[in-house]
Amino acid sequence: MRDFLVAGNWKMNGSTASNAELVAGIVAGAPTSGSVKVLICPPFPYLSTVVAQVAGSSVAVGAQTVSEHEAGAFTGEVAPAMLRDIGCEYVIVGHSERRALYGETSFAVAAKFKAALDAGLKPILCVGETLEQRESGSTESVVEVQLGAVIDKVGIAGFATGVVAYEPVWAIGTGMTASPQQAQDVHRHIRNVMAGHDADIAAATQILYGGSMKGENAAGLLAMPDIDGGLIGGASLKAADFLAIAAAAAQG
Ligand code: 13P
């Protein structure tokens, strides 16, 4: 049986003062059930401080992106080993905002996924279709290509450590959540594609849902058999909202 992972992607939000309050609230209220892990992904400048703040708690910390390179002349970039060095456990790769706004290709995302694994991080691979792609019936092929690029690069064994997050682009920050059945159908498809490579890894891989997830809709989504948690944007910025999702996972 897979555990739940409830992950907050803070995106480019927060300050020293607001983060301190948010993290204190999350640490105080995170579920104690061993079957739910809570993860927070602050912007780079705050990672070390947040790592120190969660020390001794069950809350894990991750970054929102990472370089595909190990070290060197890459101005402005952050290496995977640096994230490990400061105590990050996870890193998000291939978020749709990175793909759409910063031109990250599936090929580049796969390189980041590999670099993260090589440094001992757990990469969370984001996949998902735009509204146009959904309406033209290509959701399954879009996620297959995004997933396939990573499998080509690291093999299915990469998902013995890695996580997948299905984030339909049309549901991100729009208040339009995928219905539990819509999400389940894509999650099942992702797991089936993975099972074509290795049934045991497919069965054990956590597949998170992301896109306007909140306390009110979390229970329905998390009750679906192939939804193993959430990658939460807006609702991860208030402790009570985020904890409501974690609580739904603890009951799920
Ligand atoms: P929202 O929860 O704000 O829709 O964002 C989802 C997301 O992009 C998480 O990575």
Image (spheres, rainbow, N blue to C red):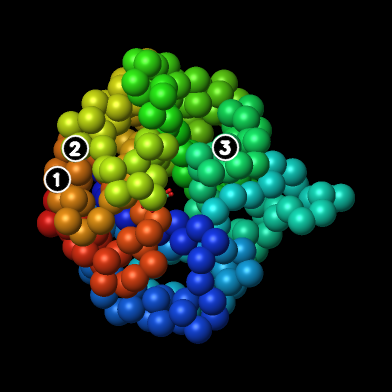
Task: Find out whether the residues at labels 3 and 1 contact each other: C-beta distance under 8 Å.
Answer: no
Position of the N terminus, as image quadrant, is top left
Residue at numbered disc 1 = 220
Residue at numbered disc 2 = 180
Horizontal side, residue 32 vs residue 204: left or right: left
Instruction: Give the image location of residue 90, x and y in percent.
Output: 50, 53
Query: What element does badge 2 sit on?
Result: helix
Horizontal side, residue 144 vs residue 244: left or right: right
Label 1 CB-ligand 1 distance < 8 A: no
User: Is tag 3's residue or tag 1's residue first in the polypeptide sequence?
Assistant: 3
Report the amino acid beneath label 1: Gly
Residue drawn at 64 percent across, 49 percent down: 66
Seen in the picture, residue 183 relative to 192 is either above or below; the reply is: below
Which quadrant would residue 214 be assigned to in this image? bottom left
Residue drawn at 30 percent across, 49 percent down: 175
Q: Which of 232 and 161 is in front in this view?
A: 232
Judge whether residue 80 can be spotted in this image. Answer: yes
Residue at numbered disc 3 = 100
User: Is tag 3's residue or tag 2's residue first in the polypeptide sequence?
Assistant: 3
Instruction: Give the image location of residue 129, x and y in percent.
Output: 42, 29
Mark 3 to mark 2: distance in Å? 25 Å
Report the amino acid beneath label 3: Ala
Which quadrant would residue 22 be assigned to in this image? bottom left
Task: Find out whether the residues at labels 1 and 2 contact each other: C-beta distance under 8 Å.
Answer: yes
Instruction: Give the image location of residue 59, x and y in percent.
Output: 38, 67
Query: What element does badge 1 sit on?
Result: helix
Residue drawn at 54 percent across, 76 percent down: 15
Q: Which of 18 and 52 is in front in this view?
A: 18
Report the amino acid beneath label 2: Pro
